[in-house]
Image (cartoon, rainbow, N blue to C red):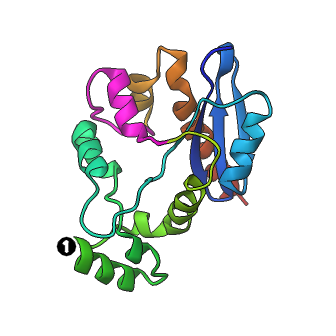
Amino acid sequence: MGCRVLGVDGCKAGWVGVVLPDGAAFAYFATAIGDLAEQASVAGPLDVVTVDMPIGLPDAGRRRADVLARRLAGPRRASVFMTPVRAALAEEDFAAATAMNAGLAGEGISRQAHGLRAKILRVDEWVGHSPHRVAEIHPEVSFACLAGAPLTVSKSTWAGAGSCWPERASSWPMTLAWRARRRASMTSSMP
């Protein structure tokens, strides 16, 4: 059996993940990230769980991981948000969170980051006691590496999907997790 990597991303209803062992694709869904990893582990141990969420929250300033990811994403750098400081993520009110982050990091926060605050905090909690090796992943950076250069178009367009579709199966989990999450969000928004 080859390397088993679970690629995970959040969706409105919870978490979606994909594992591609030996050329087959297995998709999982759960309302809790720990349950998702447990489901994927039933078929065999996971070598690593990669998550499209910040891991390691700052108490002040910017995370170096965000700065480097934005640099590697090139023209698509805006798709990598700067992780708010822990205290800002504790604020339910966007204005209060923005003020808290401005005081501790010197800048406000994006609506996207604030909208993901519950998931970011859940991942932060889960990583501390997860039995799995867990790594943060930025799809935009992964796609840039697969394409050999930063993408100049959005990954959600046909041109973007075509330029970042992986040739190597070891890179497929996050691509498929992104596509499954996109399908799940489109389905959940339908009447």
How many numbered badges does the structure rendering display?
1
In which quadrant of the rendered image does the N terminus lie? top right
Residue 136, magenta (yes or no): yes
* Disc 1, SS: loop
Tell me if residue 81 comes above or below residue 135 in the rendering: below
Q: Nearer the viewer, residue 190 or 98?
A: 98
The answer to whether residue 130 shows anywhere in this view is: yes
Tell me if residue 80 comes above or below residue 57 in the rendering: above
In the picture, measured across the screen, residue 49 lies left or right of residue 64, that is right
Residue drawn at point x = 47 percent, y = 20 percent:
166
Residue 64, magenta (yes or no): no
In which quadrant of the rendered image does the C terminus lie? bottom right
Residue drawn at point x = 24 percent, y = 49 percent:
67
In the picture, measured across the screen, residue 44 lies left or right of residue 119, that is right
- Percent position (x, y) of residue 170? 53, 20
- Percent position (x, y) of residue 188? 69, 56
Q: Provide the residue designation for mark 1.
A: 106
| Magenta segment boundaries in residue numbering | 135-156
- Percent position (x, y) of residue 16? 65, 45
- Percent position (x, y) of residue 112? 42, 63
Tell me if residue 106 comes above or below residue 34 in the rendering: below
Picture quadrant of residue 96: bottom left
Question: Which residue is farthest right?
Answer: 42
